[in-house]
Image (cartoon, rainbow, N blue to C red):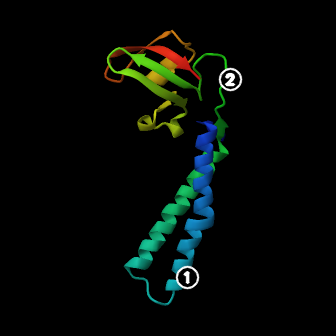
Amino acid sequence: MKREPVLMTPAGVMVLEGELWDLRYRLIPEIADQLRDMRGVGEGGEYRGLLDEQLRLRERLAELQLLLGNVMVLEPRPNGRAQPGSWVVLRHDDSGEEHYRLVGTAEADPARGYLSISSPLGRAAIGHRSGDEVRWRSPDGAVHSAVVVEVG
């Protein structure tokens, strides 16, 4: 069964690869060493806590391997149009300018300005150029608009 591609920027892939490396070569081996050292001491709360942590880390490792196995790297072509992977500056009438990076859902983080291309604004911004007006409807039904100031 083929899985949907996970759209990510090169920087997002590097972050996940770093986390994968950390889990595989540092965190999971450290827990294994602690569990080995505790053998024979008993299986109290601390031992069970370590087993739970080991399970959590192994689940995250499997999740990262699955994500990275399905990654499609977003590398925008410089054509002046907003596209997955692009940085977009929008001017909102009521709140000034906002800087966004259009990314896949797995990498979306609105607090950092990483906007999912599946979000209403992300979908609306795709294909627009500097000077274009972007209109979208938010989940509450309100209609919003902004002007594209820059695409990079």
The tag earlier along the polypeptide, 2 or 1, is 1
Residue 149 picture location, percent across and down: 49, 15
Q: Amino acid at mark 2?
A: Arg
Q: Quadrant of residue 90?
A: top left
Residue appearing at x 58%, y 48% in the figure: 15
Residue appearing at x 57%, y 67% in the figure: 28
- The residue lying furthest to the bottom in this view is 40
Residue 125 picture location, percent across and down: 51, 18
Can residue 71 be seen from the camera position used here?
yes
Frontmost of labels 2 and 1 is 2
In the image, is residue 73 above or below residue 62? above
* Badge 2 vs badge 1, beta-carbon distance below 8 Å: no
Residue 128 picture location, percent across and down: 55, 14
In the image, is residue 102 above or below residue 34? above
**Marking on residue 36:** 1
The kind of secondary structure element at disc 2 is loop
Observer-nearest of 78 and 67: 78
Q: Amino acid at mark 1?
A: Arg
* Residue at which label 2 appears: 77
Observer-nearest of 113 and 73: 113
Q: Quadrant of the C terminus?
A: top right
